[in-house]
Amino acid sequence: MVTPWSRTSPISRQQRPLLRRQGVDDRLIDIDALALYLDLSKNTIYDWRKRGQGPAAFKLGKHLRWRLSEVDAWLED
C-alpha cells in the first residue's frame, strides 16, 4: 500500500524544515496546495475527509483550509 508520506512530493522532506524555519508552517493552504504538497489528487483528500481520515481541515467561510504545521504533524504520526 502506498501512503502519502512514502511518495515523493513536490516539497521534499528536506525542504519542510526550511519552510518551518522561515515561519511558513502556520500558513493556511487550500485543497489545491494540499494536493500538490502531498502529491495526491483532490478527490483522494475529499474522500479522506468524508471518512474522517487525513489531516484535519476547517472551514473558512465556505472554503476548506488546512494549517501547514498540522499537515506536517499528521505526516510525522
Image: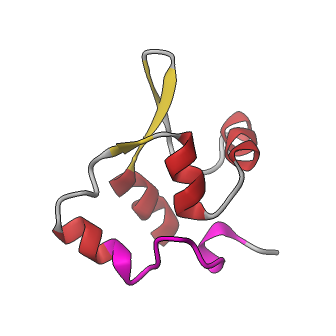
Q: Residue 47's spot in the image, x, y percent?
A: 75, 41
Q: In the picture shown, does residue 2 fall above or below 36? A: below
Closer to the camera, 41 or 74? 41
Q: Residue 75's spot in the image, x, y percent?
A: 50, 66
Looking at the image, which residue is at 77% across and 74% down?
2
Q: In the picture shown, does residue 14 fall above or below 73? A: below
Whether residue 36 sits left or right of residue 76 in the image: it is right
Whether residue 36 sits left or right of residue 12 in the image: it is right
Closer to the camera, 55 or 34? 34
The answer to whether any part of residue 42 appears in the image is yes
Q: Residue furthest right?
A: 1
Q: Which residues are magenta?
A: 3-16
Q: Residue 4's spot in the image, x, y percent?
A: 65, 68
Looking at the image, which residue is at 45% across and 35% down?
65
Q: Residue furthest bottom?
A: 14
User: How many marks are shown on the rendered structure?
Assistant: 0
Q: Residue 13's spot in the image, x, y percent?
A: 44, 79
Looking at the image, which residue is at 49% across and 37% down?
57
Q: Is residue 6 magenta?
A: yes
Whether residue 62 sits left or right of residue 69 in the image: it is right
Q: Is residue 75 magenta?
A: no
From the image, which quarter does the N terminus lie in? Answer: bottom right
